[in-house]
Image: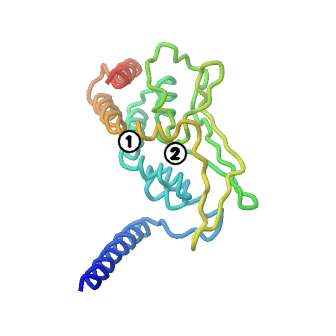
Amino acid sequence: MRLVSIIVLLVVVGLIGAGIYYRDWIFKTAKGAVPARTADEACSKFKEFIKNRDYEAASIYCTAEFAEQLQKAAKAGGELGRAIDNLKDVMDTAGVTSPEVNFVLHLLQPIPKDIDYTVKDDKATFTVPAKGIDAGVNMSDWTIDPEMFWPLLGGPARAGGAFSPTWGFSDVPVVKEGDSYKIKFPILGRAQIMVEKLKGEGQNYARGLTRIKDEVKNDPSTKSNIKGELKRELNELKGK
């Protein structure tokens, strides 16, 4: 009798697990996250969902190790990415420009939404361009936590102490797993530690950027001093 009870329990647990798996797959499929039939399709879908700040869906197209980092970053990182996009949209609408602010917002992305790729022989090269970004801005008087810069990529490169707004990584395998191709992204540098920080603090950064966005819309003084407002906000966030 006890054996029968154990078997019944295992069957129930298995059915629950299968139900969760298929529920999640149906949800992701509804957003267009279908199995990738080729290496190029896997990279294209990954790029699409990264651009939409949907890191949960993007994780479908990566092998387990990097997929786990995307899933950890999904909630806080998605909120932060959308807050960056919303602030930039309001700045564009209001005609507010600042090379320094654009540079910082570019680096604050969990992973740059403009990431691009090429594929040859089931190996991908990924690049981050610096569209509209002035790499020569002086950031020496900014106080920012560098572990919030591109955490999913392990942070940007540095040249002479300055952060580079561009990035590239080549020969990334794209492998067939089950019915889908997946990108075997490496875990670079301190990415795991940085993703944990993003998971814990990303929503605070998102709220800070949202406050600045609202003030740009409603407060002329913020509009004229957005650089100073962002510097103050990021300084406070680093000190928390």
Callout 1 amino acid:
Lys
- Vertical relation: 31 (above or below) 195: below
Residue 216 image-quadrant placement? top left
Residue at the spot 39% in from the left edge and 47% down from the top edge: 78
Where in the figure is residue 106, as x and y percent of width and height?
51, 34
How many marks do you count on the picture? 2
Quadrant position of the N terminus in the picture: bottom left
Query: As shown in the figure, which amino acid type bears the numbered disc 2?
Result: Lys
- Quarter where residue 63 is shown: bottom right
What residue is shown with label 1? 199
Q: How is the image coloured?
A: rainbow
Q: In the picture provided, is 63 more to the left or to the right than 202?
A: right
Q: Residue at x 60, y 51 (%)?
A: 185
- Left or right: where 2 falls relative to 184: left
Residue shown at 59%/59% (left/top)?
Answer: 44
- Of mark 1 and mark 2, the one earlier in the sequence is 2
Q: Disc 1 on helix, strand or loop?
A: helix
Front residue of 113 and 184: 184
Q: How far, Cα to Cα, is label 1 from label 2?
A: 18 Å
Quadrant of the image containing the C terminus: top left
Q: Which mark is residue 161?
A: none
Residue found at x 61% / y 66%: 181
Q: Secondary structure at mark 2?
A: loop
- Work out whether 102 lies above or below 7: above
Along the horizontal axis of the image, is 27 left or right of 130? left
Q: Residue 46, position in %: x, y?
A: 55, 56
Residue position for label 2 = 113
Q: Residue 108: x, y in percent? A: 46, 34
